[in-house]
Image (tube, rainbow, N blue to C red):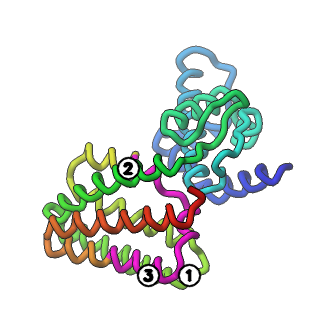
Amino acid sequence: MSGFSVEFSVAMEDDAFRLSEVAARNGLTLPDLNSESDARGDGQRSENVLLSQVAHERLRLDVLSGVLRPNQRLVEKELSELLGMSRTPVRDALVVLAVDGLVDRGKHGWTVHEYSREELVAIYEVRGALEGYAARLSALRATEEELDVIERTLDLERGELDSTNPDSSVNLNIEFHSMVVDCCGNRRLIELASRNAGFYFNFRVASMYTEDEYQQSIDDHYRLLAALQRHDGESAERTMREHISESLKVLLTKGRW
């Protein structure tokens, strides 16, 4: 088995619970998802749709986490064998990922998209606008209970500074940003920010931070929390925008762009 196959298989085992969540949302168990019956018609089409959703979720997570690397080839046959399903739902998932901007299809097949410097700047500019305004609204609309939950999550993130498990820090960072946005009370804004977040965050980015830069990032989070607790929308938006701008500087300085 190739190195990619081994790494992909291990990642599948580590994130099996996430597939279970996808199945649960559709009222199915994993065995139901992995057994493709010979039935035809609406039942078969419905099953293919669900399998496509599972494949999309799996591949999307692996692109964002860096298991699948920029410019890496994605072979439909190999992916279908690893996911335990036919090539049709895998192909459908790749098409959706291409629409998401995460994969490309060229003359030699599918590859993981590699962002240019210009694309990254555009993505972070949009992120600053969306999350900045969401932070402003959240400062005005967040409940004390919601702010308490955000503070506890931030305290956990600070506790991971010396952790040997960087993935935990990354997940807490994602959770913190997500919770701040969710408090804005604007469903459309939340959806747009969430979709844009799927472009920018990659676990590889976290590895670029020094300990001091990571500490500064957490300090920014606490400054943002303080603005939310004061219900200071202007300060919350400014802090979020500055924080995202600093993240872009780290990425452009230390990345290959």
Secondary structure under tag 2 reads: helix
Sequence order check: which comes first, mark 3 or mark 2? 2
Residue 163's disc number: 1
In the rendering, at what x and y percent does residue 44 appear? 59, 21
Q: Residues within 10 Å of mark 2 (few under 14, many from 20)?
A: some
Side (left or right) of 85 relative to 63: right
Q: In the depicted view, which residue is nearer to us: 231 or 29?
A: 231
Q: Which residue is mark 2?
A: 194
Sequence order check: which comes first, mark 1 or mark 3? 1
Secondary structure under tag 3 reads: helix
| Amino acid found under the numbered disc labelled 3 | Gln
| Amino acid found under the numbered disc labelled 2 | Ser
201 in magenta: yes
Residue 229 visible within the image:
yes
For residue 204, above or below residue 164 = above
Q: Which of labels 3 and 2 is toward the front?
A: 3
| Amino acid found under the numbered disc labelled 1 | Ser
Secondary structure under tag 1 reads: loop
Image quadrant where one finds the C terminus: bottom right
In the rendering, at what x and y percent does residue 249 appear? 44, 65
85 in magenta: no
Extreme top residue here?
41
Residue range highlighted in magenta: 196-221
Q: Tell me whether circle 1 and circle 3 mark residues in contact (CB < 8 Å).
A: no
Task: State the residue at coordinates (63%, 49%).
Answer: 70
**Marks 3/2: CA–CA distance:** 25 Å
Q: Which residue is mark 3?
A: 215
Task: State the residue at coordinates (51%, 39%).
Answer: 101
Q: Which of labels 1 and 3 is toward the front?
A: 3
Q: Residues within 10 Å of mark 1 (few under 14, many from 20)?
A: few
